[in-house]
Image (tube, rainbow, N blue to C red):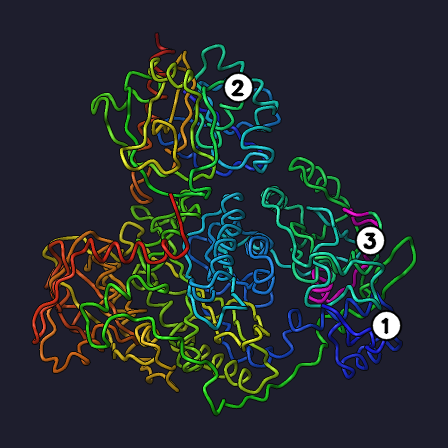
Amino acid sequence: MSLPEAAVPPHRALGLTDAEYDLIVEKLGRTPNAVELSMFSLMWSEHCAYKHSKRLLGQLPTEGPHLLLGPGENAGAVDVGDGLAIAFKVESHNHPSAVEPFQGAATGVGGILRDVFAVGARPIAVLDSLRFGEPDSERSRYLLEHAVAGIGHYGNSIGVPTVGGEIYFEPAYEQNCLVNAMALGIADHDRLIRAAAAGPGNVLILFGARTGRDGIGGASVLASAELGEGDADKRPTVQIGDPFAEKKLLECSLELLDRELLVSLQDLGAAGLTSSSSEMASKGGLGLDIHCDRVPLREADMEPFEIMVSESQERMLCVVEPDRVDEVIAVCEKWETTATAIGEVTDSGRLRVLSGGAVVGDMPVLALVDECPLYDLEPAKPTAPLYPPAPRTLRARDDDAAAILPELLASSNIASRLPVFEQYDCVVQSRTVRRPDEADAAVLLLPATRSAPGARGAIAVSIDGSGRRVAADPYRGTMEAVYECAANLACTGAEPLGLTNCLNFGNPEKPHIAWQLTESVRGMAEACRALDVPVVGGNVSLYNEGPDGPIYPTPVVGMVGRLPDAARAGRLGFAREGDAIALVGPFQPSLPGSELAKLRGEPLPDGLPELDATALRTALTAVRTAVREGRVRSAHDLAEGGFAVALAESCLAGGHGARVAFHGVETDARLVELLFGEGAGGFLVSGSREALLELGETLPSTIVGEVGGETIELAHDGGTISWPLEELRAARDGGLAERIAIVV
Amino acid sequence: MRFGVVRFPGSCDEVDAQLACERVTDATILWHGDRDLQGVDAVVIPGGFSYGDYLRPGAIARFSPVMESVIAFAREGGIVFGICNGFQVLCEAGLLPGALLTNASLRFVCRQVDVVVEDTATAFTNACREGGRGTRLSIPVKHTTGRWYAPPELLDQVESGGQVLLRYAPGQNPNGSLADVAGVRNEAGNVFGLMPHPEHAVDPLTGSVDGLTLFASIRDHVTAHVAA
C-alpha cells in the first residue's frame, strides 16, 4: 500500500482514527512510542478487536448442554460423550488468498490447525469453504487451482484428512475470493487447555519456527515510511507456510500437554506475538514482560516492533513453571523445534516489551485487549439491487425440463467436486466413515475403547453457506444456511452439538453492508435458537470488496454433530433396486434465487420465502431418527438444483436409476418449478414402502417413485422424460473437471 | 510375531499402520533416531512426508539412524514393507528397484483403486492364495509422487524376475506408473514397497478390508519361517 508522504500522521497510516489515537494517549497517559503505536494499531484493528461486529455477535446463543469451551478460546469445544471433546473452529484467509492463493490457503489451514491444537486437541479433520468468480475467468481458475493445491499441500503433508467442504462460483467473488478453513480436533475433557496466563513468576516460552519479516505490513500498513526502517514495505505481506514445521510443532505441543508441562498454551496468528501474549495476559488478568531481543530471528536486524507484530507461521507460546523449563526445552529438542524463554508472567497488569534491558514498550493489558472502542453499525436496506444478474448461460428453453437437468448437473456450482476433493487426503488417521460424495456430511469414527459396547459412535461435520441466497435475503438466507447444515447432519443420523461461523462481508461502514450483516446475524441467532445449537466460536472477515463492489454476504456455517452408531451412518446414494423413494419435509420449491434462475440470467429476488422453524425442526428430527434406526437406506438433503438434482445425485452415488411420477402438474413451467425450485426443509429418502409411509405419519411426505433401472424416468401428465444415467454422470463428472482442465 | 513401524519426523500414517498391524498381531513404533530395532520380526516404513519431503521424497529419511539398521536387517533377510512414502524411502535406499516420479497429473491424488495381485507365493501376498493370481484388492492411493519408473533394462529384469507383486487394475492407474506397477519386491523377496495404502483398507466401517491380507500374509510368513 502506498501512502502520501509526511502529510499523514503515523496513527492514521496504521489505520487508527484520530479519536482512537486520542483514546490511546489517554489510556497511556502519554504519547505512544512507535512500538506501542504499532501494537495498538493491530490490537485495535477490526481483525483483532471486532469493533464493528462485537455488539452484533452478542445476539448469538453461546450456551448449551454439550458446550465445553465457548467463544474467546482458541477454538470452541463440545462434549461428544465418553469423556471426549471435539474442538472446532472456522476461520477466513480471504485477502492473503486473493493475493497469493497457494500460500494464503496453505497458511489458512495451518492457522486453523494451530487454533485446534492450542486447546490441547489432536486435529482430526479439515473442511474448506471456497468462493471464486466464474470458472470461465482465468483469474478464478488460477485462484482455484492454487488455493486447492495450497490446502492439499498443508493438510496432506501434516497428516490431517480434508473430509469435506464446498465450492461456489459467482461473479461477486471475482476480485475477492473467499478461503475459509475449518478444523476439528479430539481430546479428553481434562486435556483441554485454556489460553489464560497464570502464576506470576512463571516463564513464557516461544517455540516453533524462527521469527522473520513475513506477514508484516498487510492490512496494518506497518511498513510505512514513518515507522519502517528502510524497505520493509517491499516485502511480500503474505506469510509462508511450512507444514513440516507445523507437524513437528503439533506433535511437540501434544507431547508437552501429555506430560502436563504447560500452564497455558496459545498459538501465534494474526498480529503475532502482540496479540497472543496480550490475550494470554488479559484472560489471566495478569501482566507479561517480553524480552524481544531473546526471540530467535531469521533476520538479524529486526526492530522490536517488527518482532512484536511479525506473523511468521508455525509458532506457539506457552506459560511454564520455572522448574519445568528444562523439561519443556528437552521435549522441543526431541521434535527438532526451537524453544526459547522470552519472558515472565507478572502481576503488573501491563505488557512490557524489553530490548537490551531497556523498556521499549509499556502498556496496560486491559487497554490493549479490551478497551478498543466498539462501533454501532448504521444499517440501511439498499433501495436498488446491489448485484447485477449474471448473463444467461442456459441453452435450454426455460420450460424444457428434459434439457435443463443435464445443464444444471454440469453447471459450475452443482458439477462433481471430485476433481478437487481427490487432491486431498480424506482417509489418513483411519476415522473416515463417509468420504466426500458418499453422504451429505463427513462422518468420522470416535475411539472404540470408550464407546458403548457393540456400536462405534461417530461425529458428523458439514460446512455450508450460500452467498447468493443470503444476498437475496440476508435474514432468511442465513437461516437457510444453518438449517441446511443441520439437514446435512440429519442425513447421516447426527444430532447437532455446536456451530462455528465465519462471517464474510463487505465494508461494514457502508449502510447496506451493515444491513446485510445485521440481518444475517439476526437470522443466524434465530436459527441457532430454534435448533438449540450454540455457537462455540468463529471469525468475522469484513471489507471483502473489489473494485466492482462487495462480495455476496457469505456467512459460512460449520456444524458438528454426533451419531450413536457409525455402522448406520446415512448415505446419499440409492442402495437397492425396488426401494421406494419419498420426498419428505416442509419443502416449498421456488425458483427465484435458485441455480436455475442464475443460469437463466434472472436478477436476485428481493427476499426469500418465509421459513417455518417448527416444521423444519420436526423434519430434521424425523429424518435423523429414521437414519439412526436404519429405517431408510438413503437420505439426501434438497439443495442447489432442487428435487431433480438431488434425485440425480442419489442415483449417481448409488449406481441405480429411478422411476418417478409427478401427476396433476398443469404446465411445463410448473413442472420446472417443482423439479428445480429450491427452498429449505426438503429431503429425498429411499427405503421400504412401509418405512417411508411410517415416516409420512410425522411430516409431509410423498412417495414419488422407486429405485431401479439405468435411467431416470419421469412420468408427468405431458408425457415421460427419460435421462440415461450415463449421460447425467458424464454431465456431472465433466462439468467442473473440464472447466478447470483437470487431466489424469 | 511383532511388527515395528518406523516414525520419522513428518510421518503421517504410522499410527494407522500400527493399528493395521495390531489387527493381525503385535506392533510397536520405532523412533527414527534410534538404531535399535527392538528385536521386531518385520519392519514397516509408513506413509507420510518424512522430513517434509524436502529435497525429494524419501531422500533424507533414508540416511536416518534407524534406516542404517533397517538396511542391515533387510540384507540379512528380514521382512521390510514400505507403504507410499515408505516405498519412496526404500527406493532411495537402493533396497527396491526403480524410482517414484511425480504423478502424470502433477497433482496429489486420493482415490480408491483396485490392484491386481500378480503372485501369491510371496511373503507379502500369501493370504491371497485362495483367490490366486489375478485377485483384486480395493485399496486407496494418496500421493503426489507415485509414478513408478525404471529404465528399460531394469524393467525387463523386474518383470522377468516376477518382482511386480501388485498392478493397478486395467484403466485404474492413478499416476501414470510404468506397466501399471503399484508395488514391487526386491530380488530376494524380503523387501516390498507399494504406493496404495493397505493400512487404510482394514475396517469395513471406513471402507474395504482388502488391505488386511497383506499384513496377514507377512504375519503368516514370519510365523511359519520362525517355526521352521
Nearer to us in this view, A439 or A399: A399
Labels 2 & 3 near each other (Cβ < 8 A): no
Q: Amino acid at mark 1?
A: Pro
Which badge, 3 or 1, is on the more N-terminal residue? 1
Q: Amino acid at mark 2?
A: Val
Q: Is residue A559 visible?
A: no
Q: CA distance from mark 1 to mark 2?
A: 61 Å
* Chain letter behind tag 3: A
Q: Which residues are magenta?
A: A275-299
Q: Which residue is label 3 attached to?
A: A302
Q: Secondary structure at mark 1?
A: loop
Q: Position of residue A472 (x, y in %)?
A: 41, 81
Q: Which residue is label 2 attached to?
A: B70
Q: Which residue is label 1 attached to?
A: A32
Examine the rendered structure and indicate whether residue A23 appears above or below residue B105. below
Q: CA distance from mark 2 to mark 3?
A: 45 Å
Q: Are marks 3 and 1 on the same chain?
A: yes
